[in-house]
Image (spheres, helix red, strand yellow):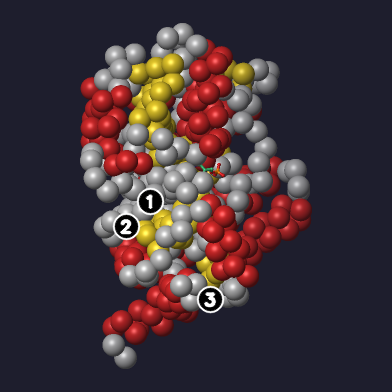
Amino acid sequence: MTSTSTAKTRLVQHREQFPALANKIYFNYGGQGPMPQKALDIISQAQTHIQHIGPFSTEVGNWIDQEKQATREVIASELHVPASTITFTENVTVGCNIGFWGIEWRAGDHLLLSDCEHPGVIATTQEIARRFAVEVSTCPLIATLNEGDPVKAIAQHLRPNTRLVVLSHVLWNTGQVLPLDKIVEICRNNNSLLLIDAAQSVGALPLNLTELGVDFYAFTGHKWLCGPAGVGGLYVRPEARESLQPTFIGLRGITVNSAAQPVNWHPDGRRYEVSTSDFTLYAGLKEAIAVHHQWGTPQERYEQILCNSDYLWRGLTALPGVKCLRTSPPESGIVSFQLAQNLHQSHVKLVQLLESQGLLLRTIANPNCIRATVHYLTLESEIDQLLEAIAKLF
Ligand SMILES: Cc1ncc(COP(=O)(O)O)c(C=O)c1O
């Protein structure tokens, strides 16, 4: 057996751990990742265990504390940060909201976001603007996908009163990866905080947030990490913690005295956590991350994602009726494309047609396109099947 065929056999065997991949051809990893069976099992075992020894007891409390700490450490190690910097949330949006609302806004402050942010994030900035008389403006990054410099575009839109810059690490619509190291530098020089929507980067890119130096980095476990829906997190740079006040407040975020009175915030990321959650999901996320490590390091997984997105991008580029948004190979697992007849209707129809054939993709409204996302789990043969299905249209 050649080393390539050994690697393929190994991946095919590894994929058998993901039941969702057995009966469809999946290109929606950026929407939600398929869960490994081990993660599904551990959640159900943990639920049973909690009922067996509790559900409310000292032993359950100890179990929850251990699971929380172990999962926090696993996440922190993925991001190369101390575990104390991690706050558990439910999803990306909650993490972003902790960042948005925790800043003590002053009337006349400026908030800058890009033209590629998620609707939930845009809506929050609009409410911040209304409630605190904050000026919100948008810098154009879609236009920098194939030419131009996103850092320059952001720099041109910074103002002396820019309090916060909000950007996605990987743009969910075009797949562009923003050079965060350079962006951190221009934000620091401008005394602006930087909040990153990491929906499409955690689990997809190798990350070292300590080196990057971003202030707030909001992520989820249910997309590229293939964990259960309902567990995400927020990294807050230790130096930025004191400038970010907790907004939603509860027992998990505070220390209490012997008379059950609140004394202080927890000194670390726990201060933004609120109250009871489904802690069995934390065990599920930890297990999902362990399954990825069986296959390869974050760097190896990213390289495989790039091999797959390059293969898909080349195949789509070669099809006469198809135009990829990118004119060069992708930097992430997101491959967005348009049909030559660029009508929204035709994109929706194609996605529906493909879904009826067991191939799952999605449309994106801005820019109007179809988005296919490939993981390290994606097989070349799946990409071939997608290309064949699209080629049949023309
Ligand atoms: C860039 C981006 N931000 C935010 C979200 C919302 O994520 P969540 O459902 O984890 O809040 C998504 C989900 O698709 C996304 O792609």
Specify the amino acid type for callout 1.
Gly
Which circle's residue, 1 or 2, is located before the other in the chain? 1
Can residue 74 be seen? no
Q: Secondary structure at mark 2?
A: loop
Quote the CA–CA distance across marks 2 and 3.
27 Å
Residue 44 vs 114, above or below: the answer is below
Q: Position of residue 79 (x, y in %)?
A: 37, 46
Residue tagged by mark 1?
175
Which circle's residue, 2 or 3, is located before the other in the chain? 3
**In-image side of 51 versus 353 (left or right):** right
Q: Residues within 10 Å of mark 1 (few under 14, many from 20)?
A: many
Q: Residues within 10 Å of mark 2 (few under 14, many from 20)?
A: many
Residue 84 vs 229, above or below: the answer is above
Question: Going 45% across and 10% down the picture, which residue do you hit?
Answer: 106
Cβ of disc 2 within 8 Å of ligand 1? no
Residue tagged by mark 3?
16
Specify the amino acid type for callout 2.
Pro
Quote the CA–CA distance across marks 3 and 1.
28 Å
Q: Secondary structure at mark 1?
A: loop
